[in-house]
Amino acid sequence: MDQHPSMARMAQVLQALQADLTARGDSQTAQRLADLTARAAAADERVHVAFCGLFSAGKSSLINALTGTAERATGAVPTTATVASCVWQSPLGAVVLLDTPGIDSTDETHQAATEAALHRADVVVMVADYQHVEADELLDWAYALQESGKPLIWVVHQIDKHLDGELPFAEYQARIEQSLADFGLEGLTVFYTAVRSSPYNQLAELREHLARLAVQAPASACQRLMERASELLQQHAAAAYGPRLAATAERVAALAGEQPADPAAAAGLRQRLTDALQQWQTQQAVAQQTLRQTWESLRSEWLRKIELAQIAPYETAERGRRYIESLRSDFRVGWLGWRQRTEQERAQRLAAFAQDLAERTRNYLILPLQNELRAWLQGNGWAQAERLAAVESLSAEVTPSWCASLVRTGAVGSEAYGHQYVREVVAAVKSQVAGRCSQLIDDWAEQAMADQAQATAGQAAAADRWRAALAALQDWQICWDEQAQWLAAWQARLVRAAGSQEEVRAS
Ligand SMILES: Nc1nc2c(ncn2[C@@H]2O[C@H](COP(=O)(O)OP(=O)(O)OP(=O)(O)O)[C@@H](O)[C@H]2O)c(=O)[nH]1
Ligand SMILES: [Mg+2]
């Protein structure tokens, strides 16, 4: 037995992969892989060639003719039911030929049997009978195989049926090869064969071509096993990750109107969603900021008007000062009953001050402010009854008892306190009004913010959808990465195992 250090290594890697597939619950693929493991373990370097096609194309007849036997049953109805292999001792070496059931057989188990054996084929000979070369089912099937990387040979069989009177052979040949190319099946080697006599029969050429496969560089045996195992890796990945990828991709599409086909497309979509979201957030922040600034400038404008209102001119201030004067301990009115009369005088002065101040507050502060607010509400389409009523109820409490409560008793003796007191009372009145006005502004600003949120609710919903799409895209990416990592790790191990044979043989 030849020494095959890397076939042994390949067997080890395939066995490990088999264990992984079993652990992942894919016993079917693990079982298929076992065929390859057995080939590696037995250092079987023979090329495996499968004959596939529609039923009654002549696959079994062709193998009989190639091998010079009549081992295989042939017939006009679906005949071959299971995959059967034989070793053909070609003039150049042994080749394993696999006869398969027709892929369009009326018996479903026939096609399943063919599909279950394809992983063993290093080369597939697509046998199309003269009348069915352009059958869609056959072309679709061949195209999918070629896409998966399987080397194909195309055979147009039963060429003895060709009648030159109908169409010169060269024209027929050109037409067939053109329609294969049109279907995307390019670069195929095409043979025209028959088991009956025909001037165009290339059975000998096909035999020679297949025999040459037997004497490929020995290094390619490992390479072929690697390729077959890769096909199984892809199949497992499609089954294991495909549904999850499809589901998350659909979720993304439902939210963002676009499916991620690959990581590049996903990255592009992610970027567009992130940009849109960021733009929306910036817009939102700017709009809020603008609104806040509008209200803050209204607030300072109105508070300044309150600040500037003249509610205590000289006469009013004088009344206040005279009230404070009356509070001094040495202040007396009359001789008889002076206590009572002094108290009366104090009460009168307080009342006079409070009444005057209340009147001026109303005329020079409250009323102008109300006019201003009403005008603003009307000018901005905001003059709803509720808001007008709030403006109407804007007032200040300037009663004698309130004015009296502001007196700082300890300061009464001081000469300057009279004027000071009036300033303090005026400030207290304005602060009352400013507080109530500010409260109104707070309420209105809040309503304005709510109105704005309402107006942009549609955009906010879109932004929520973008966020959800980004999350779904993330799930898709995680799944894709998981698949890519799993595939890459095994591909690398297979490539190393296949490559080492070349190194060993080269040295
Ligand atoms: N005229 C002609 N008939 C052929 C040729 N090769 C096979 N046939 C006939 O075609 C029919 C089908 O041949 P099979 O070899 O059984 O075809 P198959 O592709 O193996 O069919 P299944 O196993 O049923 O998928 C048989 O009746 C054959 O005799 C050929 O080159 N020329
Ligand atoms: Mg058959």
Image: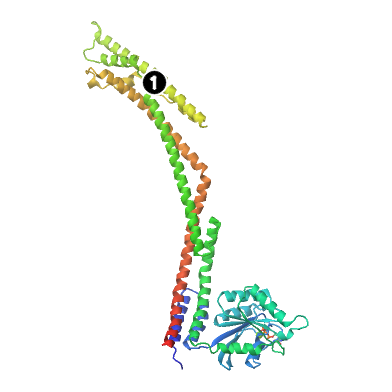
Residue 89 located left or right of residue 447: right
Asked if disc 1 is less than 8 Å from ligand 1, the answer is no
Residue 59 located left or right of residue 167: left
Displayed quadrant of residue 315: top left
User: Can residue 121 be seen here?
Assistant: no
Q: How is the image coloured?
A: rainbow
Label 1 residue SS: helix
Q: Is residue 184 above or below residue 250?
A: below
In the displayed image of the protein, which residue is found farthest to the right?
165
Displayed quadrant of residue 181: bottom right
Dot 1, how many residues are within 10 Å of its Cα: few (below 14), some (14-19), or many (20+)? many
User: Can residue 280 be seen here?
Assistant: yes
Q: Is residue 392 above or below residue 460?
A: above
Q: Residue at x 50, y 50 (%)?
A: 463
Tell me which amino acid carries mark 1: Thr
Q: Locate residue 284, reporting x and y percent.
A: 46, 45
Residue 312 located left or right of residue 16: left
Q: Locate residue 497, reporting x and y percent.
A: 44, 81
Q: Locate residue 443, reporting x and y percent.
A: 44, 34
Q: Is residue 59 above or below residue 310?
A: below
**Label 1, on which residue?**
361
Q: Locate residue 249, reporting x and y percent.
A: 53, 62
Q: Residue at x 33, y 25 (%)?
A: 428
Labels in figure, total? 1
Q: Where is the C terminus found, in terms of image quarters?
A: bottom left
Displayed quadrant of residue 147: bottom right
> Observer-nearest residue: 154 or 119?
154
Q: Quadrant of ligand 1?
A: bottom right
